Amino acid sequence: MQKGLQSIDYLVFFFYFIVVAGYGYWIYQQKKSKQASSTDFFLAEGSLTWWAIGASMIASNISAEQFIGMAGNGFKMGLAISAYEWMAAATLVIVAVFFMPIYLKNKIFTMPQFLKQRYNSTVSTIMAVFWLILYVVVNLTSILYLGALAITTISGIDFTLCMWGLAFFAVIITLGGMKVIGFTDVIQVFFLILGGLCTTYLALTLVSQQFGEVGAIEGMNQMFTRANDHFHMILKKDNPNYTSLPGLAVLIGGMWIVNLNYWGCNQYITQRALGASLPVAREGLLFAGFLKLLMPLIVVIPGIAAYVLYQNGMFQKEMLGADGTVNPDHAYPVLLNLLPVGLKGLSFAALTAAIVASLAGKANSISTIFTLDIYQKFFKKNATEQELVTTGRIVIVVAMILAIFISPFLGIDKKGGFDFIQEMTGYVSPGIFAVFLLGFFWKRANSAGAMVATIGSVVISLVLKEFPDWTGLYETPIYTSFLDGEGKHIIPFLDRMAITFVICVLVMAIFGLADSSTRENPKALVIDASMFKTTKSFTIGAIVILTILVVLYATFW
């Protein structure tokens, strides 16, 4: 195994850098206006095509936690982790049909803006602060840290230098605003998919060679035979990974809350579509759904291949962590080091593309929420368009610097990147989703209930995680068998989210029904059934996605 990058690898990577930076600058020059516009900077209003919206969503979503974390989970638990990707495809269809018309009809630019219109300014401000803390301290920080960790593992470049380099690259793209991010993300996705598929192909080929066969198809057949337990989507209770993916919860439980909140109530994602017309936005989300179906082939299958190779005696030392035990998150970097010169550079560029695109998208969302929901609201209500754009650019740089200095103290590497992000966001996601869902479709939802659900989500999640014995839930047949190393009962993460969500909905229902003024709630949204009608082409595309999902789950049940 040859560690580090060679001259040709660096040339391939340099070519990628020049293409992305050059294309971004060209887009900026082509689409910049004489008068700086905040809606253009933050939303690229009217500039993004459906393919740019879909590609940008995926580029912002797929980052180091997917390449490293999901490949690691593929090594550890197998194809089941693909539930996050494949269920996201179905979720994008739902968001396109039901959520997007509501946002666009009400001219929503930010998620806190929706909360202010539907509830009140207090709920909006609290959620804006929640999102800023979550985006900076958890998301931006973990993406930067894991990205730098992966790159230094592959290239041998100093870890700190990698962090600053990634941040600098992302800032260059982000300062051009959403229009530059959206169109450069198309290039990023091209490199991401091409490099990712090359890694998958060569990993499968290597598996076939280890067992005297030739070709990627034979490699996949060997994986089916030698790691059959890694090709089941629904885990049984006796599976050691059940607490991460608790059986049918991935189909009818907490997985829906994870995905609907992420893809439908998340500034970081929805921002790409909020500046487009409804047909274009829907087509963009549908395109993202098709790309999501492809992601497990790029980020999960290589992890399973690494598992089969490891079981056959390869890279025994390379898979060990600092504590001397097997660290699944090493799977993807180890595979990249097996690639031949040139292709390693391409895969390295794909990984970098995923990291930089996610950093740029997250930084832009942080900038949007702070500028439009904090700065303009509390510091300068009459700020000019130029002042808003300037503030947004300053926030981008400050957020990136904060992430660099915070990241070493979070213990991200110990928890595992993907699990770290899911656990942290899981404290607030159930409450946020309850507030949005009832705000959309139930006129009696009020601000008092929204406030209690928002704060209560964190409290309930903590109680269910730290003190499950208090709840008595562990006594039911669902949870009885789950004990940690200290004999403490455990409620699986996705089940905790589902329980928290149900409690938040009940709380909001109680507050809403107890408030007689909500019978004729002036802040309730006017829902017209015609809003949810879709074009024939969209309907056909959605049916194709859902059919593919049914076939996949039926095949790998």
Image: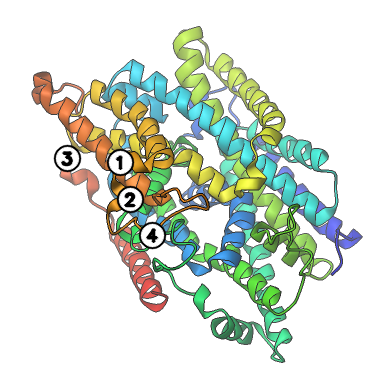
| Lower sequence index among marks 4 and 3 | 4
**Quadrant assignment for the N terminus:** bottom right
Residue at 46% x, 51% y: name it.
487
CA gap between label 2 and label 4 equals 8 Å
| Lower sequence index among marks 1 and 4 | 1
- Tell me the quarter of the picture where residue 139 sits: top right
Number of residues whose C-alpha sits closer than 10 Å to that of mark 2, classed few (under 14), some (14–19) or many (20 or more):
some
Number of residues whose C-alpha sits closer than 10 Å to that of mark 3, classed few (under 14), some (14–19) or many (20 or more):
few
CA gap between label 4 and label 3 equals 47 Å
Q: Position of residue 230 (x, y in %)?
A: 52, 73
CA gap between label 2 and label 3 equals 43 Å
For label 1, the residue is 471
Q: Position of residue 226 (x, y in %)?
A: 59, 83
For label 3, the residue is 528
| Lower sequence index among marks 3 and 1 | 1
Amino acid identity at mark 3 = Asp
Front position in the image: 541 or 139: 139
| Lower sequence index among marks 2 and 4 | 2
CA gap between label 3 and label 1 equals 41 Å
Marks 4 and 1: in contact by CB < 8 Å?
Answer: no
For label 4, the residue is 481
CA gap between label 1 and label 2 equals 8 Å
Residue 427 in the figure: left or right of residue 212: left
Marks 2 and 1: in contact by CB < 8 Å?
Answer: yes
The residue furthest bottom is 212
In this rendering, the label closer to the viewer, 3 or 1: 1
The answer, for residue 109, to whether it is visible in the render is no
